[in-house]
Amino acid sequence: MIATYPFSAIVGLDDLKLALVLNAVSPRVGGVLVRGEKGTAKSTIVRALAAQLPSVDVVAGCRFACDPRAADPRCPDGPHDPGEQRHRRPAALVELPVGAAEDRLVGSLDVERALTEGVKAFEPGLLAAAHRGVLYVDEVNLLHDHLVDLLLDAAALGTCYVEREGVSVRHAARFLLVGTMNPEEGELRPQLLDRFGLTVEVKASREPEERAEVVRRRLAYDAAPEAFVARWTREEVALGERIARARALLGSVKLPDARLRQIAGVCAGFEVDGLRADLVTAHAAMAHAAWQGRDVVTGEDVGVACRLSLPHRRRRDPFDAPGLDEALLQDLLERHRGDDDPDPGGSGHDQGEGGPSGEGPDGTGHNSQLDRGDDGPTGEGGHNSQAGQGADGPSGEAGHDSRLGQKEGAEAGGGQGGAVAGVAVPYRVPVLKVPGLGAGASGRRSRARTPQGRGTGARVPEGRVRDLHVTATLLAAAPYQKERGRSGPGLLLRDGDLREVVREGRESNLVLFVVDASGSMAARRRMTVVKTAVLSLLLDAYQRRDKVGLVTFRGSTAEVALPPTSSVEAGAARLRRLPTGGRTPLAAGLIRAAEVLRVERMRDPDRRPLVVVVTDGRATAAGDVDRAAGLLKGVACVVVDCESGPVRLGLAVRLAARLGAEVVPLDDLGDVVREYRKAG
């Protein structure tokens, strides 16, 4: 077995290291969400921390890792006698795969044994396996929402409740939850973001020396893992001992009332929803005090905790990326500092004592500064909390005008020499659906066969029974009771009698926007309305968990402005920067859309597409449109008719007839559009 890469040997990523350590000290902090680009050692650092957690004593044979000194009295494998045999093992590291089902996560009744042997056997899931260890969820944003809800509930309560298939089980599930995600693949909903205790944004260092040191250490590890790990033994032992000391001290750490008021003042100042932010910040501040060897929370501890607990809670719009206004944070910390602060600096940072804070064994001095709560001298290169990004920065600017009637203007950076229209606040739009019954990923748009939803029938299971249909099972077994020799009450069942529930719910779709950005669309400030309407449709796609893509056409060509992705934030950003002007190559736009769908069908064949063409129907070469429309035969399409004015040519309606598409006049998308028409 290859040795785990040492936690102390990881270069940079100080905020992430600190967030993980605070959760290791106090699981009540609520876990860490790690946002960042691929290839930034997110998985490596989580596995490295798990190896540093203290070993645990467990009751021998207990599938729920009960502590012999304080066994769970309601453990499904209990009750445990104080004198039962015990053994010591490393803290568990459990990884939740993206494709896991609910029964794999929480556990389930062994249906086959229950029906064929009469044994009510419960099979524990991954939450039980992670108890007193680490639960690592890579690409947590790609998990279905209800699974994210389940694991976050368990992480918050420290208990897993299983109520399914006639079984009712409760067991302890206290673990360090770490989720990683690439924002380009889609965001978590704000409600789910709020359930994570801390968040850290990571990016690869832009400093050549630091990047070189990362590669140097990795090459050394790959060449001789055992020897490399041995070089860091002293630092690893010191780190493990410091975590153990902090855990022991945590119970005696006091949170003065002045510090509690400071936490409440900062959270209120950022206008975060609910009180979870206050609780998480308080727990994180106490954990940081214990980590620093203090038994009283100071202003420094509060400042560090706020920087890690608030960035993902200040989102006021679904298209806002997490971030924190550093200047506002400093002002609020100082304003609510109080008079009994033992740290007059309020939110200063000291280096603390102990732990791996000096040079590494190779003398490079690049070792982790876990004691630090700031972003380092450069604010990047692995320190990547991005806490200093203000609410008006690139990720928080939203780009929304307060009025729909803002004039278009030619802005710098239009990219293609055209004018860039303003974009207003998105609004609620009618639901556009794909007809028929699909079988794609669970979502909130079109009808589909899904694991969740209302039961509509029964079927013979393929493999293990996941969702037993009791009535259909009994009906299947009833005609054969005489030949099976039944002599008493009840039914004799065989494996072939089992039936599963067929459920109908909603699926997510690929919504591909094909947007006309030509000169005719830019007339009479129309593009402001069009872009706002498309932004509203994007928001609707976000709420319904769709993948989205964006094809635009203007001038002489069409381009894929956004390949299909779950990140509607990326689509909104591209839309705001979309320039207009030039001729109208409608056929090129349809051809490019067909090509995008062809490629995406190979990648994700079960996800049904919905093509939304936003145009006034005018085309540079009208004869080519018929041939291009034929490429989209059989694809669900909607044409948003953007034609306006007292005299209308009906070109968009004719295009819809060629595509076999539904026509939605732009005015029908929302009252705000109609009001703008009247005002304009």
Image (cartoon, rainbow, N blue to C red):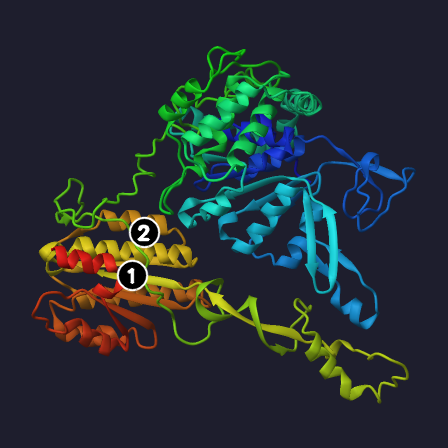
Task: Please state which amino acid type lies under the numbered disc 1.
Answer: Phe
Question: In what quadrant of the picture does the C terminus appear?
Answer: bottom left
Query: Is residue 371 at least partly visible in the picture?
Result: no
As drawn, 566 above or below 440: above
On screen, residue 662 versus residue 546, left or right, reads left
Callout 1: 10 Å neighbours few (<14), some, many (20+)? many
Looking at marks 1 and 2 on the same chain, the residue that comes earlier in the sequence is marked by: 1
As drawn, 323 above or below 189: above
Task: Please state which amino acid type lies under the numbered disc 2.
Answer: Gly
Query: Picture coordinates of residue 446 (x, y %)?
Result: 43, 68
State the image quarter where residue 118 is shown: bottom right
On screen, residue 243 versus residue 140, left or right, reads right
Kindly identify which residue carries mark 2: 571
State the image quarter where residue 436 is shown: bottom left
Residue in view at x 92 percent, y 38 percent: 83
On screen, residue 533 versus residue 649, left or right, reads right
Residue in view at x 75 percent, y 63 percent: 110
Callout 2: 10 Å neighbours few (<14), some, many (20+)? many
Q: Which element carries disc 2, helix, strand or loop? A: helix
Kindly identify which residue carries mark 1: 513
Q: Which element carries disc 1, helix, strand or loop? A: strand
